[in-house]
Image (cartoon, coloured by chain):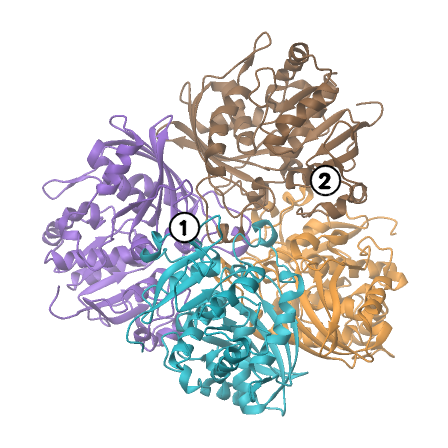
Chain colours: A cyan, B orange, C brown, D purple
């Protein structure tokens, strides 16, 4: 645990993921929010005026009267930068902070594919964080950029890691039922989703991410390079009328056929990499396996482990690929803001700040 | 077209599928409703009192003052019996009507697996209706029982038939997002589905049906026997907050790899068996293929072809099985009441009444 | 009935009310759509490309390939102009068309308060349409502008007219539960209304309209001037998770106390002004009174009389004001596009085109 | 604070209000749950099997393995009995426990109208609890029954008390928009509320309660008798698609006209009776007044003060009765289980156990 609280800032603090950062950082044992940044339009206003709050939990008291600042290195002096910026803006702004010496823990997709940028889920690939040493060397930065995956990949990849360790994973067909908060605010118009589903998220970009990102995270760090896992993914994404919590129905081919009971045992026994195990945001447990025939359900299970636990259910035989199951993960906690904060805790724990 | 209107009755007329029968039979050019049957509790009441109407369209005038009768051959004199009964009751009652000479067009699952019972989607297997001759001979009935599949299989199987004809289908992984009306009334409690999905329908029975029924319908009638199609299905069912319209995300392995464009062409060019083409309930078109990146959607597409058309979209390459797409079908029209009525029309057209 | 079809145009045709105009004018016996106008951004595109269709019913065939034109008198040659424009644009554009000789039937609020502009619900104040003669004389227009009220006032005012005729109305407290389609598209974000209500519509402007517009419509035309009805209104508006159909809970003080049965009889016996009775869009009946303890309900009753009928229920004693009841009206049919079309039919019938 | 934890039991523990009791009593500083009772059908099962959990928060660990017992004095030894029983059963069972010496804190409506039974909202009428002395004397009980009002009256009455103290209240017209959890589980069918509202709750009983219960709570205790407040209420109730949180739109006539600012000040400055102020469940604050034009909203405000605070907004002039505003209260916390627990704390604090 750090001796004193580390100053942190949130970029894109007024959006829906930004709000989740603000909420999760309330009373964080290690971090203290010193700046909330948003677009120039909001800069100068109190946060309580600038943000149209959309979370069930009330806005934390610490944030209400903070003045929003621009997302610029001139205005922000913090050791850790949490980025909930849109891709195009993150593209430009995040390297400026890394250059200036900050550890940027980003939820944006801009640098996820960078060959020297860790794409982290600390439970499963905490060792990949060492890539930042190479990143610093090659880019001449004193800071760094580390990223977390898109929200739909998150729970799926954690469950797959447990199975991959135990049996080896070869193929994955994943069909998602994604929550509205994943689209930000204002996001999905109510007339589009009332009494309806939309059989595509972000018109396709989401599916490409789900077919690529897990392969990097399930890959191996070898001499400053991630070797992508040799797994084929097919993704189909859907938007449904759920506020928080992404559900994925997965059919999986393993290297050898296994009984559902063996898969359940592997999922239950999976533990984090030791350096990711006892951090403030560590999921407890990493994976929860439900036995009921109709779980996990978003409304009932998304807050398992304070929203950081991956919940798996309906583990059963698939007549074609061998195994199938359902995964649920809280998309704005484990799948977004909580993910970046967990990554930051890992950086601290590894002495990489 | 029949010379005069044929007297028909609806069993289970007060339930949600029964209501759809009552609605679709309003002003039917061939059929005239002479009896509405329900449980003994409702018998003797006016239909407008006995039924808690749940459809958007108002209750047809013809039905309002009809007195509900028990589902018994003593009380009903009709040539065609539409059955929206629960499985256990259908089990017992439907053969009584067939014995008494009526053509029972059933939406219940009781007899779908019967080796002498046609499981029909007239667009794709109208020839299977000839099995009733064998049924009559072997059971000594003057009437008959014909069935339609469960609502989730319906649209999927129609789309698969077009692909099977053109390319041969080997494997199908199907993930459904099913509407609430499929569970009847009162059905799904609102507290279970608001801000939620349920990752299983009917706790498993539904998935078995989707893995079995299409194989019979895509099979071949050979000398009084259906040879099941040699296709493997894996089904995952979900309930979502949609009133009407079942969506299925399908990944399909064909006998040979085909381009999405070729699959789209096969879907578009598919036409019904000639004897099923110009009936009052024939879908026009059988299959509609949408090109948009976010269609079909239940609210916008379920009423295509008056709810009888199967709508397909997002036809694209699947990295694992080869082809994937989305199918939408109106679950209480094409997938239930409309299906049974279409079957009855086929019986009339084939002179099998 | 006109001898030949009258050419009409829709301004703001791509929005949600505009779409309802396009839908309702399909196969209209008197009117033929010759132009669909929208913003310059959409002009030149096919309507099927320019409009993101949000209605359940498919886009009518006639409209799909029409090229969208700008909302300008240079581009449109039509006798009747249906306006679904936003207030600020309507403010400027509608008089140009009236000047150019067209009868503008507007759903916008811009001119509703004009002292020479009829605010019409033909069932109840068809005689007010004569005000256009004075409007033409004073403004030197060969065309005219006639308006319909906001969607929340519509059903309420129709029900009140029946009571006012019979007993005299003095005070009305109205609490609305309004549908999402009233906010247009994209309108209300899904995150704002899922598992929620918003206790204010348009942040206040709506309540002022409901407190003012009924007084004009229930007023008396005297020598080219409307004398406002001497009734006090108090409005409270709410947005709820309903797609179409505005519900209003009304408490009413009449000039003398009446029994609910007498009020029901007055509502049931109410008939339109003779010149508004047999038009293509005339509601049949004008008012439907439901006796059930839990009706009207938006999903079940909004399409009564093809969406033009006002449905009233729960008529009962109010311990404070004397009488209370619930009113339901389809907000984009009777309350918007259908209203303007009905107004246009009245103009034709009165020879005022 | 009690020296050691007081043993308590929950009757009707498997229902939706019962679950809320189980959840709120987790880690309660004064109370320890020693028995969970439900119908004979559930008795003998583990609570985790008997209850179909419907709350977002996971089932507390303490409850999972408790064996459910029948709601009988033979099986339960507790000083305080929390009753979430249905009216008819409460009618019979509650007096048995009171007779046997337990303090029954009931959410059922059975005894709310009893002339010797306190109907309590401790913030506003904690002094009424003294009525239990008279109850004991007259009925010969060593225990007692105290009740809390129905969920719709709760927030409204608290807000009215602040206004009544300051200005005197004469008339109240209240229109509710009530949450689904108020109907219990399974409660409202999803097909009844999706894309819909129901303009009546419990087909009328609810409105009678809202028109009667506040008068008792706002009344005065005089020599073992409550004098009902001289206020007339008119209630109109609606069910809307909200999970938790009842909203009420109220128009109020005070003894003299007051400016909204004065009303806001009275609401803000209202404080509890001293004996109700510092209990574990005391709302902090009692009333929160929001200034935004679109608050309170159920999803955003229902958890104010851990679900015990009454949130008021849109305080403004009413053109007819003088003042209007919106009240929000969490229906299963402040309006049900939390209410009974708060009542129990008051009994303890007053030495009335």
Q: Name the residue nearer the viewer: B10 or B312.
A: B312
| Disc 1, SS | helix
Figure check: A80 above or below D163: below
Q: Is residue D102 left or right of residue B262?
A: left
Q: Is residue B238 above or below residue C279?
A: below
Q: Position of residue B304 (x, y in %)?
A: 74, 53
Q: Is residue D292 above or below residue C121?
A: below
At 59% from the left and 37% from the top, the residue drawn is: C331
Towards the viewer: A283 or B209: A283
**Residue with the most extreme top position:** C223
Tell me which chain the residue with mark 1 is part of: D
Quadrant location, the N terminus of chain A:
bottom left
How crowded is the residue under tag 2: few (<14 C-alpha within 10 Å), some, or many (20+)?
Answer: many
Chain where mark 2 sits: C
The numbered dot on residue C23 is: 2
Tell me if I can see residue D88 in this picture: no
Residue D33 seen in the figure = yes
Task: Tell me residue C261's x, y (percent).
Answer: 47, 28
Q: Nearer the viewer, residue A275 or D275?
A: A275
Picture residue at 22% right of the left edge, 31% below the top: D167
Disc 1 to disc 2, how far (Cα)?
35 Å
Residue at numbered disc 1:
D298
Q: Secondary structure at mark 2?
A: helix
Query: Do the dots labelled 1 and 2 sit on one chain?
Result: no
Do labels 1 and 2 touch, CB within 8 Å? no
Residue B123 on image: x %, y %: 82, 63
Q: How many marks?
A: 2
* Residue appearing at x 43%, y 73% in the figure: A308
- In which quadrant of the rendered view does residue A250 lie? bottom right
User: Which of D302 and D209 lies nearest the eye of the viewer?
Assistant: D302
Residue at the limit of the structure toward the right, as seen here: B274
């Amino acid at each position: 645990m750090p001796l004193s609280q580390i100053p942190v800032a949130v970029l894109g603090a007024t959006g829906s993921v930004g709000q989740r950062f603000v909420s999760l950082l309330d009373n964080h044992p290690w971090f203290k929010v010193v700046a909330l940044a948003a677009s120039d339009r909001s800069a100068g206003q109190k946060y309580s005026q600038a943000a149209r709050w959309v979370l069930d939990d009330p806005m934390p008291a610490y944030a209400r009267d903070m003045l929003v600042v621009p997302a610029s290195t001139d205005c922000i002096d913090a050791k850790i930068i949490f980025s909930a910026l849109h891709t195009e803006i993150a593209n430009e702004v995040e390297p400026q902070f890394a250059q200036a010496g900050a550890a940027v823990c980003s939820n944006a997709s801009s640098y996820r594919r960078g060959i020297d940028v860790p794409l982290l889920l600390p439970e499963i690939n905490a060792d990949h964080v060492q890539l930042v040493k190479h990143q610093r060397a090659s880019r001449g930065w004193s800071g760094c950029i580390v990223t977390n995956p898109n929200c739909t990949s998150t729970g799926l990849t954690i469950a797959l890691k447990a199975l991959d360790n135990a049996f080896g994973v070869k193929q994955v067909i994943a069909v998602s039922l994604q929550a509205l908060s994943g689209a930000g605010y204002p996001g999905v118009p109510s007339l589009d989703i009332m009494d309806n589903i939309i059989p595509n998220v972000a018109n396709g970009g989401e599916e490409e991410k789900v077919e690529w990102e897990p392969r990097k995270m399930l890959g191996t760090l070898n001499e400053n390079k991630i070797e992508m896992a040799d797994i084929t993914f097919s993704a189909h994404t859907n938007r449904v009328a759920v506020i928080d919590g992404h559900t994925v129905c997965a059919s999986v081919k393993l290297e050898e056929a296994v009984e559902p009971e063996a898969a359940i045992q592997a999922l239950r026994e999976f533990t984090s990499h030791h350096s990711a195990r006892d951090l403030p945001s560590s999921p407890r447990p990493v994976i929860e396996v439900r036995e009921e025939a109709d779980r996990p359900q978003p409304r009932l299970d998304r807050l398992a482990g304070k929203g950081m636990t991956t919940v798996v259910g309906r583990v059963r035989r698939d007549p074609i690929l061998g195994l199938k199951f359902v995964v649920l993960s809280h998309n704005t906690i484990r799948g977004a803001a909580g993910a970046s904060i967990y990554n930051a805790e890992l950086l601290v724990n590894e002495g990489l700040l």
